[in-house]
Structure formats: C-alpha cells, structure tokens
Amino acid sequence: MTSFPELDATPVLVVDTDVLDRNLTRMAESAAARGLALRPHVKTHKCVEIARRQLDAGARGLTVATVSEAEVFADAGADDLFVAYPLWVDAARGARLRALAGRVRLTVGIESAAGARALATHAGTGAGVLVEIDSGHHRTGVPPERAGDVATAARDAGLDVVGIFTFPGHSYGPGVPPRVAAEESAALTAAAASLRAAGTEPSVISGGSSPTALIEVRTDATELRPGVYVFGDAQQLELGAITERDIALSALATVVSARDDVLVLDAGSKILGADRAPWATGYGRILGIPDARIVALSEHHATVRWPTESPRPGLGDRVRVVPNHACNAVNLVDELVAVSGDVVVGKWAVAARGCNT
Amino acid sequence: MTSFPELDATPVLVVDTDVLDRNLTRMAESAAARGLALRPHVKTHKCVEIARRQLDAGARGLTVATVSEAEVFADAGADDLFVAYPLWVDAARGARLRALAGRVRLTVGIESAAGARALATHAGTGAGVLVEIDSGHHRTGVPPERAGDVATAARDAGLDVVGIFTFPGHSYGPGVPPRVAAEESAALTAAAASLRAAGTEPSVISGGSSPTALIEVRTDATELRPGVYVFGDAQQLELGAITERDIALSALATVVSARDDVLVLDAGSKILGADRAPWATGYGRILGIPDARIVALSEHHATVRWPTESPRPGLGDRVRVVPNHACNAVNLVDELVAVSGDVVVGKWAVAARGCNT
C-alpha cells in the first residue's frame, strides 16, 4: 500500500479522487434513472471542490445543516440551498436568512406552527419551506398525517410551502436499510396526502440517507439527499451499504508503538472522531486489512489488534484508517489531501469546518 | 439560568471563568502542598489564555500531545514544554523538533530503543527524554521493569534521559480512581528503580490524570500532568471526580423541537463530540438538571429525555450542555466564549485546534 512519502507528517485525511468520482457518478446516475432530483448533503465534506463536482454531475442543488454552512456555500457560488433542519429563528438568525434569501434560491425546514411563525416574523417570507416529517427515526419532524396542519400554519404565516422532507436515520442498523426505505416511502406518501388534503400540492417530496438512497422502492419522492455516499466510511461498510473499494476517505497514520499482535497508530479521536455505534466492530477500520480491529481509541492513539495472518507493519510504517463516521472526521481538519492512485493531486480546504450556527 | 442574550447564535462553547480559576487554584495548591511540580496538559483547552493562567498559578511548564501543539505554545511564549507522546521521528519531524529545542526547554517521550535512535538521528540531542511506562492502561509504554533498558538505549544514542512518565488512563472507570492511583504510584516507583539500576538517576517522575491527580497516595512521583481538571466534563462528573459546581465548560444550546417529555437541542456531535464511555448515562449532561438524559446524538441534534418534575424549557429557550469529554469538544470550535456569572467577558481563540501532527 502506498504511504505517500511526499506528505511529511501524519495523521492527515486523504481523499481518493478516483473513488470519489465513481461514487458521485453512481449516485447521480441512479437518481436520474429513477427520475429523482439529487440534492446531496454537503455537511459530509464541507468542501467547495466536492460540491462543484456534485453539481457538475447533475445535482439539482445542495443540502446544508446550518445557516453558517449555507453562507459558506453561497459565498462559493452555489445558488440553490436547502437547510434541512427545523430552524428556530430569532432576530439575529432571521437577518442572516433574509440576506441569504436575497442572493440564492433558499428553502428551510420547519416542524411546528410556532417555528413557522418565528421564521416569517424574523426572516420574512423569501425562503420556501419544507415541512419535516418523522418517518420512524423519532428525532425531529411531525407524524406524516400532521404535515398538513403545519403546512396550513405556515401558509397562514405567509410562507411558501414547497413540500415535505424526512431523514430516515433509523436506516443506520445492520440489515434494516431495505425495511427503512419502504417505511420512508410510505411516510412520504402519507405526508404528501396530508398536505394535499390541507390544500397544498407538494412540489418537493424529499428523503434519502446514504444507506437507503440506492435502494429501489416504489416512492412518491421527488428528491434524494444522501451525504456520506461521496466518501463511504466504516459504518456504511459494516452496514453492507458499500464495499471497501467504495471508500474514498481515510486517515493516513503512522505506527508509533508495537508489541505482540497490537499496534498503536497516531490517529485518534481528534482526527477520526469518537463515533462508535453499538453494532460497530471497533473505532474504524484499517484499509486493506479487513480482520484488523481498532479496539481502543484515545485522542492521539488507535490501538489495533492486527490479524496474525497479515504481515505486520513496523514502527514508522504508515497505514490508512477508515473513520466510522466520515462527517465527524472531516469536521476535525482544515484541509483534505486529494490523491489519485499514489500521487497527491491537491489540498482542499474544509471551507465549512466548524460551521455549527 | 442565564441564557446570555448578547450571544446571537447557538450552539457555542462557554467557559465559566470563575469556576475555571477555582479549578486551577485547587490543583495548583494540592500539587504544591504535596511538593509535586504541576505540568498541566494543554490538549484539553488548546488555548493560550488558559495556559497563561495555569503558569501564573504556579505550573512548572506545559504538557502537549503533538509537535504542532508545542509549536503553537512556543510561539505564544511558553518556554518549557513536554511532548507526552512516544513520537516516531523521521527527517521532517526531526527538523521541527530541532527548531523547537533551539528556543524552548523541550522534553519528549520515548518507549523503545528504535524510537530513541530515530529521535537522536533526526532531531539531534537537544531535547531531553522521558521513558514512557505502562502503569496498567496498556496503551503505550514499556513495563516498569524495562524502563532501564530503554534509558540505556537512549543514553547510548547520545540522548539526555531525564526520567520517566506514565498516563494512568485506566482511571476512567466508576469507582476505580483510588486503586489506579496506587497502581500508578507503584509502577513509577518500580520504573525509577529500573532506571537507577541502569545507571540513570531520574530527576522527573511524572504521572497523573484528572481522575487521580487529587488523590493523595504515597508516591515517588515528582510531577503531575492532569488536563481535564480545568474544565471538568460529564465523564469526570459521572466518575465522581468532581461535582457539578466544578464544571466550567458547557455548550449553550437552543431547544428546536419539543414533544411530550422529549426535547431536541441544536447541540450535536459537531460541538459536543461523539464520546460515550460504556458507563456513561448518555451523550453529555444538562447543567442544573441532573435527571435529564441525552438519549441520542446526531451531528446537530441532542435528543433529551426531560424529567417530568423539572420545569420544561420551551421552543427557542436556551440550556447548557456539559460534554462527556471536554478535550474533544474544544477541538471542534475556533473560539471559546469566556463568561463570568451572567456576563460575557471575552472570546478566547482555540489556538491549537486541529494540531494533530
């Protein structure tokens, strides 16, 4: 495995641009073949260069999680942004939304009558709204049959109700994505009916998570918003949503300690993130060594149990670690190292890193 | 509870400077009363203003985790730095260490003969070394009785062996800190004997984690290196190492969704970190509401089960969330908001944020 000798310090996050482009193309083609608009979630990469590639591959617009992410991508020239979050809007955030709506096509999430009124009061009515529904993840969003009530309240507040959205986050479990994709589709269908019964024809019916986005189901959805698919990560791998050759993001790390079958790497939670789902095999995976297990993680140490049948790297050797959750890993660094094969081809700023507000 | 209306967006990390100063003073006084030098680990705060307060309160020098953290604090005027990590030194890192050793009193960790030789070859002999020993955490470091072997190899490579260090990270478990403090002390004593038998008198015998640093044990240690004690966090609270009035760091967050006994806040893993030890009650704690539980965490959502006996905040209200692990939370933001009581008194840059190399 290449160790990128021209990179003179580890740990750093490396993006394999060949894999990245293949991932972008596959999702774009799958969405197009099903007649679905693709609006990728850029919280995963926070990176202008990758957003441009997504738009060039046919994305309709971009999804963001926060107003500050929207501001970064608007500054970079994106002209169609959806804030997929049930924003609570006060005067300060309202002023920022008003400014954004003046320069891009802006849509934001709402999930309550009170939230709709706060949005209209403080941000005006320049942004379209999508009503968030709960398709089974039980985080935010109203039950599908209540979407019409929220839409009516929003319309009464003067807002332009464009449609509905959901995030089927309960797709993050082994073996469940096909069932969750069906639940999501049923929930979107029920919510669309609720909107129509309340007198609003939804033009956008938006769903999709990376584990479910490529699953073909009968759906009323018009739009997909996957995020992680650009990079893949150890969670997607262990869910069976991807294979190792779909993984574009890894941390290049150095072996700093070795004893018996255990190695310690210099990549810890400050570059991989501390995410570990209950069903995960460890704190990430070692690229190319499927039976290695990251059994402990500190801020600057990954403790790896190395399989006896694989040649063991020595002190100072480099290996590549796949984070469990790409979105949180990328948010820890200021730049991504773009590579093609063995060659470093660029450094990409994580332009929206830390944009939490 | 104050909601800091002059802060116009959430989530942000807030430092209560009154609690911070009390924490600094207590640790400094405890170390002084026991005749121990205090060399706090600045990876927790990465913040020049807080390091200055630690030095003003009597700290002997600073501990860092990486060479790039050392560079930031040297630039800020610190003149005595210990890199508490078994560095693997190649030509590029060696040149950086050589430059650092030319302008500050520098000490670094080693744990192998090969590591010692690589250090001497690439960085020269300007930095002192401490041999890392394993006091039971089983991450890095040699067994105490082998410290002398590593010291001899280092001396043969021309290095100045100053002493030994350990991190008793196995103190992070409910009820175990007193036992671990005793184990750490025994390991340091055994390692010091091993060094002496190899002909090196250790002038620095360094230990200490925040859960064990205030525990009085009979010890041969000369130095303590706690980090988290400045802020406290939900882990220290749940370990019983501190009480809620010792918590200086929290994320100011807004209620964005409310149903029945569940609230959703806008603080998620991108400001709190995703750390959750197996023994933790949740993904952090709500300041002032000990029976609230953060039952789920996404990147921008904390799902909180609110106790029925406590008045429930409404949409748009602000609450303060205590991260599980302060070090990883601070590394997610560019600045900390310093407050005293209800008043914002400053913004402190997280100067060494993202310094992983």
Image (cartoon, coloured by chain):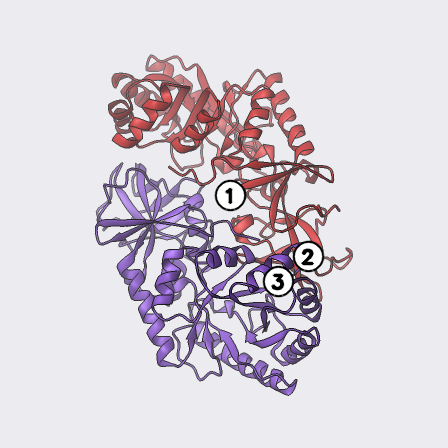
Chain colours: A red, B purple
Q: Position of residue A307 (x, y in %)?
A: 73, 57
Q: Residue at x 54, y 66 (%)?
A: B84
Residue bearing the label numbered 2: B91
Q: Nearer the viewer, residue B236 or B84?
A: B84
Q: CA distance from mark 1 to mark 2?
A: 31 Å
For the residue marked with disc 1, what is the amino acid?
Answer: Asn
- Which residue is found at the position 51% from the left and 59% from the top? B70
Q: Which residue is mark 1?
A: A328
Q: Chain of mark 3?
A: B
SS class of the residue under badge 3? loop
Q: How many callouts does the rendering have?
A: 3
Which quadrant would residue B257 be assigned to in this image?
top left
Quadrant where the C terminus of chain A lies?
top left
Looking at the rendered structure, which numbered label has been put on residue A312?
none
Is residue A187 in sight in this rendering? Answer: no
Residue type at mark 3? Leu
State how far apart marks 1 and 3 are (Cα): 26 Å
Question: Is mark 3 in CB contact (under 8 Å) with mark 2?
Answer: no
Tag 1 and tag 2, C-beta contact below 8 Å:
no
Q: Nearer the viewer, residue A188 or B24?
A: B24
Protein chain holding label 1: A
Residue B87, labelled with which disc?
Answer: 3
Q: Is residue B197 above or below residue B131?
A: below
Disc 1 crowd rating (10 Å Cα; few below 14, some 14-19, many 20+) is many
Q: For the residue marked with disc 2, what is the amino acid? A: Ala
Q: Is residue B164 above or below residue B326?
A: below
